[in-house]
Amino acid sequence: MPTPSMEDYIEQIYNLIETKGYARVSDIAEALEVHPSSVTKMVQKLDKDEYLNYEKYRGFVLTAKGKKIGKRLVFRHELLEEFLEIIGVEKDNIYNDVEGIEHHLSWNSIDRIGDLVNYFKTDSARQEELKKVQAESVKE
């Protein structure tokens, strides 16, 4: 299993490849706010652990294993953002909150959060009821 730091890199690489068709060390460094040398070291580690194939001066591509993990990490991130939005977390806080919690939840917890998101999405009245409960708690 990848470490939380490895997950951040895999997720970012996956996102870049999905949106741009490629991921460069400089793009990853900018997105993760780290030095390019740190990216190079991590890319080498991800290559060693078979999450991507890296050739010096030629770039890298995710392996099937890396793509599978990347897709699941992006799903987790988007699900948590959706969950926090549904429960009324202010939009300005959502991204940082997800970054703070996503590595600390089991996949079982993620699946149950997914169930809850689906529960609220299948009936908009449920979301309205939640908003009423939240409005009442603010009054108290």
Image (cartoon, grey):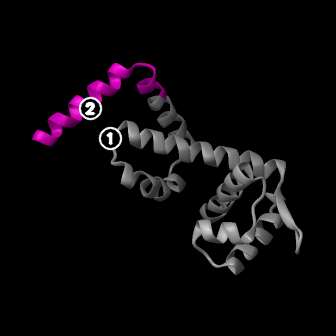
Q: Nearer the viewer, residue 86 or 104?
A: 86
From which residue to which does the magenta span run? 118-140
Task: State left or right for residue 131 relative to residue 11.
Answer: left
Inter-mark Cα distance, 1 to 2: 8 Å
| Residue 88 marker | 1
Q: Which residue is mark 2?
A: 131
* Amino acid type at image mark 1: Gly
Is-magenta flag for residue 71?
no
Residue for point 33% across, 20% down: 125
Query: Element type at marker 2?
Result: helix
Count of marks overlaid on the render: 2
Quadrant in which the N terminus appears? bottom right
* Amino acid type at image mark 2: Lys
| Residue 130 marker | none
Picture coordinates of residue 104, whole percent (x, y)? 50, 54
Residue for point 15% across, 34% down: 136
Q: Residue furthest front?
A: 20
